[in-house]
Image: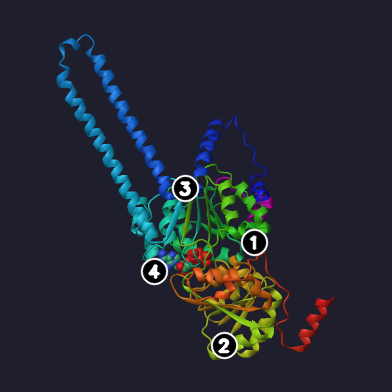
Amino acid sequence: MEKASYFLFAGIHFDKKKFGSDFARFQEKKESDDSVGDSSLFEDRKLESDEEEDEKKEKVRLKKRKRKTMRTENVEGFSVFKSSKSEEPLVKEENEQLENEVSLEKKKFHQQLERDNLFRKGHNIHVSGKNIPSPLGDFSELSSSYGCKAKLLRNLAELGFKEPTPIQRQAIPVLLSGRECFACAPTGSGKTLAFVCPILMKLKRASKDSIRAVILCPTRELATQTTRECKKFAEGCKFRIKLMSKQLVKGADLSKFSCDILISTPLRLKLAIRKKKLDLSRVEYLVLDESDKLFELGLLKQIDAVVKACSNPSIVRSLFSATLPDFVEELARTIMHDAVRVIIGRKNTASENVKQKLVFAGSEEGKLLALRQSFAESLNPPVLIFVQSKERAKELHSELVVDNIRVDVIHSDLSQAQRDEAVDNFRAGKTWVLIATDVIARGMDFKAVNCVINYDFPDSSAAYIHRIGRCGRAGRSGEAITLYTEDDVPFLRNIANGMKTSGSEFPSWALGLRKKKWKKHRPRRESISTTPKEKEEKGRRRRK
Ligand SMILES: Nc1ncnc2c1ncn2[C@@H]1O[C@H](COP(=O)(O)OP(=O)(O)OP(=O)(O)O)[C@@H](O)[C@H]1O
């Protein structure tokens, strides 16, 4: 953790003298930030309203004092002739009127707070932070309260978005108010629109001056998907929305490159900054999608480079994910100012739309048998199967391809074009079963996936939540089956716990297992291949 925050601040030198006023402001923020994490919304609001109340009382006091002074000043020399009796009731009346106004305002404020809290409760929205904007009742408020262009609203309607999802209800007004935000909401609950919509609204119109917004995604597939979604939301608005592609990075000097929204993986963007002088100093919005993945050790240096390059002091940063571990929250607090925390439902739990099942398969042979049997009984495509490595993905693919199933495979050994083709075919329904490594476990939106099979047990509880979240999206229902062997038993407890909290039937005995710290669980497994030759070859290579 220490190390992580160090990375994110490396190279930043703060001239306290030069930026004295900013520094003072930051210190104030820091003090108030401390209260943010612990206090509930109610307490925060109460504090605010108390402060406001004090302020109002002070105003009344000042007015009274001013009036008194004025009276004494004016009266000099004349006071003896003036009747203080006629003045007093008038002043008293004025004071009472003023106090009434203040208490009415206070009452209205508290009523609005109560309404917001009730509304949030009804939508399972939990917030913390100061002065949090009211959640959206419906999309039309984007235009009545925030001046959203009719075209954007029409695009949402055309996409069939009738009502905002809970994360959209709260995160959109937070970002529209210029506040930084870290948000955790279940898989498939519309986080993409929650961060794209405020950007499109705040940027107002297309510009050719600079790069104005950056969205970082952990994989190429997700970056491509997000670019496509952004373009759909912005249809007809002339915004220049670009994906940082390989060709772009290979190109010449990028110092003059500009667009309204740039979507990229961290590595590509870091290369573009370092080698091609891409200028991010005027970026106004930075989104870290799947933020917990981006903050993993392998990507942290790249994220650090991007965060540093986005040096605009008024930048608004936001973090989104379906899983938000404590270390990411801590890290977020060190880089964000006055951020609002938005959690939908319970943090780090799987989508309630997915019916989860755990199946003991005994051995690797048992797994293949169970899979074949279930496909023979009923195959309800599209089905996604996750395995733990690209080798195992290839092995399982060569087993199923002979079973007369329309099956394809995606892993990091394939070229980008092959990977894109695999995703497109699966989306188009040409492929019924897609075997995958975790390369598409996060963020990918395959709308109609009915079933996710964890052929190999996931390597962490976050991986489990994201994998099974490829089904049960946008309110649809889905099913997730996780096969396990003896090797996986020590890790069952976490999953059973998750099943319990998200309302699925779970093996209660698994809750009694000893707590096990879940570091990347990728046991060495027997080969999937049933072809003796391949199996032997594999065994020989392993022994070497
Ligand atoms: N307000 C809405 N009404 C109906 N459908 C919506 C709405 N918002 C988003 N969707 C749809 O819901 C699906 C899931 O959205 P999205 O991919 O943004 O989810 P997500 O929360 O980012 O999921 P993940 O955590 O897996 O990345 C998409 O198909 C999207 O088009």
Contact, mark 3 vs mark 2 (Cβ under 8 Å) = no
Q: Quadrant of residue 529?
A: bottom right
Left or right of residue 48: residue 513: right
Task: Tell which circle, 1 or 4, labels the residue nearer the N-terminal end.
Answer: 4
Mark 3 crowd level (few <14, some 14–19, many ≥20, 10 Å Cα): some
* Residue 275 colored in magenta in the image: yes
| Label 4 residue SS | loop
Between 85 and 352, the residue placed more toward the observer is: 85
**Quarter in which the C terminus is drawn:** bottom right
Q: Check disc 2 and give the amino acid type.
A: Phe
Q: Check disc 1 and give the amino acid type.
A: Gln
| Label 3 residue SS | loop
Left or right of residue 239: residue 49: left
Q: Which residue is mark 4?
A: 160
Q: Position of residue 182 (x, y in %)?
A: 51, 53
Task: Tell which circle, 2 or 4, labels the residue nearer the N-terminal end.
Answer: 4
Residue 375 numbered tag: 2
| Label 2 residue SS | helix
